[in-house]
Image: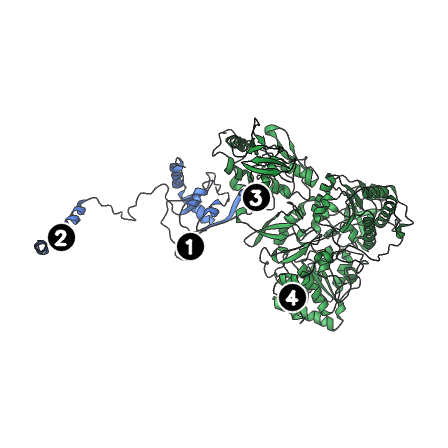
Amino acid sequence: MINIEIDGKLIETGRGSTIMDAARKAGIHIPHFCYHKKLSISANCRMCLIEVEKAPKPLPACATPAAEGMKVHTHSALAVKAQQGVMEFLLINHPLDCPICDQGGECQLQDVAMGYGATASRYNEEKRIVMHKEIGALISTKEMSRCIQCTRCVRFGQEIAGMMELGMAFRGEHAEIMSFVNSSVDSELSGNMIDLCPVGALTSKPFRYTARNWELSRRKSVSPHDGLGSNLAVQVKNNKVMRVTPIENEAINECWISDKDRFSYEGLNSPERLTKPMIKQDGKWLEVEWQAALEYVANGLRQIANGAGAEQIAALATPHSTLEELYLLQKLVRGIGSGNVDFRLRQSDFSSDGKQQGAPWLGMPVAEINSRDRLLIVGSFLRKDHPLLAQRVRQAVKSGAQANIVHSSDDELLMPVANNAIVAPDNLVNMLAQILKALAAEKQAKPDASVQGIEAGSVATAIAKSLASGERAAVLLGNFAQQHPQAAQLAALAERIAALCGAKFGFLGEAANSVGGYLAAAVPFGGSVQGMNAAKMLAIPRKVYLLLNVEPELDMQNPQQAMTAMHAADMVVALSAYKHHASEYADVLLPIAPFTETSGTFVNTEGLAQSFKGAVKPLGEARPAWKVLRVLGNLMNLAGFDYDSSEAVRDEVLGGVDIAQRLNNTLQSVSIPNPQSSILSGLQRVANVPVYSADAVVRRAVSLQKTHDAATPCVTLHSSELKKLGVQPGDTVKVSQDNASVNLTVQADDRQPAGTARVAAGQAATSGLGAMFGTITVERT
Amino acid sequence: MQMIKNFFKTFLLLELLKGMSVTGRYMFKRHITVEYPDERTPQSFRFRGLHAQRRYANGEERCIGCKLCEAVCPALAIKIEIAEREDGTRRTTQYDIDLTKCIFCGFCEESCPVDAIVETRVFEYHGEKRGDLYYTKPMLLANGDKHEEQIAKDRAADAKYR
């Protein structure tokens, strides 16, 4: 620790910290533009010039290391003159278009100019003009003349997003921020550049010219998308969500949010929103009152329960539902006498049900990922499924960690990967077994009985060596591994690997409430009444389906089977925020409120329960789903359905419960039958859920749907497979699975393991196909 | 003594004469009464009357929808909605001034960076029913078109003081 004096205040600061750090710690404001606490120091804006005694010239506070006994003046005549001078230079080329600038009112340049600038400029010459660039559907660069070349966006791309998509070209007065020729900014974190930009050069395209920031009221909320539970500031005007920005929470999302969190609000204002309860009568949809709709549902449920039996009732919910909704859904269904309730819609292997000792979670706090030194990430489209967790992994790798990947798709992770084991889906178990075997050898431990006959290959040995050499390792299972048909075996092997190298073992939660669903007991096991899991409910069709914001053709592991079951059912009740394909097979549509219009709780992947309040009133006659389910409970004359608030529901679920006690990744007695390599013949499907197709809200976010990540799916094959088929990349091929086929464009990617075909799920174009795993055929058309 | 004075005052009508002399004096002085509407008082070029929205000489509306007037209005009389026009410029889709709320403080024209919203010299306007004094964008633009000459003159006269 060293002592320095800033403006007469004695401050103790760490060795190696800068004057800016010390001043921030002491609450002394030094004006700045290019400095950002999460980015590297570039010291190019010169706004933070301050006077240091005995230094001949003013020094930049952000780049000057604090030294023992330093005396700093931030407001001395010299400092103020330097700051004013810099401000004047910065304003030479900055257009005076604050009135039409979306940044106006929240602009750092505007604020600092008010505080440190002169009243008028001495510069009368023409200002420079920078032509605008087209860099995609999310960021508007219409006014690049406003740029002050702080390079925060460039450094963000390089350091946080992992990909330098914007750079500074040319020099001096000709310096411009631009993307590579004709390329757009496609990072899944790109929206943060809008927040970082201290002026109005990079602004939000969807928000452009729709409101001024002083008109917006900021309401706290929690992201309903990925498992991280980012803290959001939902900004509202006239009862409409106008934009979403991050709320800083160092333990969860730091000061970032992913583009999915930021721009999916457009889906909330979608014209597809369902605003009135509807009942289908004689094939025609009628708008009805809530009372009528709910009574219709209650009667239907009662009839089936009394006639065909309660076990004919099945309930499916998305893991993006709140804890309260999931809890009340299972309480309702169990109250009727059925245990068929599940939220794990894309899971295919349920054999660990009951063997898992608690809710599967990350195995550690999110912030701990940064300090891991060895990582084994199994089956995860990490960057797209968990953009901010990927960012944390990237930071860990940057500070020396080794990332090892076992997956069926070699997607660019934008970080150096130590070892990459890319194998076909049916080889994943074998690969993990090899790693376990090699690790046992490395640790000189007795190998697990299940991997006795396995021969560890070179990649597996390298991964084992990497894991064994670390001190703080982590083994993480991604969405792909959890959706895998041998998910239980993968988890068991991963757990054993973690145990052997003393690593943390965790699951990357797919959705906002992947952990909460277990706590709410919205699973067929563990509750008072046992029942069927999500896959079984569809494989053995039920008579009644209750869908809580589920779009079966997009959200399920096997959309084809799901749709067959829906069409065959006697009654399908869709609680949905949107009018979607449910109108084809459902009998009742109940409009429910998305996350901004309801209060609720999400339990994120580290087991942190975050409650939020509604930011706006429900649209039209939509109602929070917990209220709908509560009234349904009343109409069914079930006991314990008299909650006054969602908080009451939450307290019933979580009150007096130590969530940490309920989280447990330990698997007991999962057998690993001799994990052979290559079981399946023919092409195997590798299905990712594209980042902007993952849930109902984001699917309707117009701008996100214009990005590259939302492009129409194609089928990606190894070029040797293309040769076998005799087609060229870009040709249309016929892709068939389970007696259904679609025509897709074919692409070659040699990083895809041979024998696999990557066909995305969760998109309309591929929703006719079968399960996300299994064999698939690709033919010439 | 006082009693004698009062006695003479009573029947000599001195007060009346005094009063009448004032009346008589004013009878021959120049009248200051303005016979509105035939005559009018002079107006300052800063007169704050009916609002108007101006256009540029090429017919383009001046307002860029910055909403500063809406923000500054102490009576909350202004309501603005904005959107991007097809040509990419920022324009208002709705610009309403509720003149029954307006207190004619002139802050709106003071805050306007492009001199779009102005208060004209017009003060003779009325509404016959509720809502007549709720001025919408076309009405304000029509006002501007009608009085542009005077408005421009007034701005020019005021320019050196701004």
Inter-mark Cα distance, 2 to 1: 53 Å
Which residue is located at x 43 percent, y 42 percent? B110
Tell me which corner region of the image, top left, top right, bottom left or bottom right, holds residue A86.
Answer: top right
The reply to whether label 4 and label 3 mark residues of one chain is no
- Pointers 2 and 1 in contact (C-beta within 8 Å): no
Front residue of A299 and A354: A354
Q: Residue under circle 2?
A: B15
Q: Residue under circle 4?
A: A630
Q: Is residue A617 above or below residue A5?
A: below
Inter-mark Cα distance, 1 to 4: 48 Å
Inter-mark Cα distance, 4 to 3: 47 Å
Q: For the residue marked with disc 1, what is the amino acid? A: Asp
Q: For the residue marked with disc 2, what is the amino acid? A: Glu
Q: For the residue marked with disc 4, what is the amino acid? A: Arg
Q: Circle 4 sits in a helix, a strand or a loop, which is it?
A: helix
Crowding at dot 1, Cα within 10 Å, few <14 / some 14-19 / many 20+, comes out as few
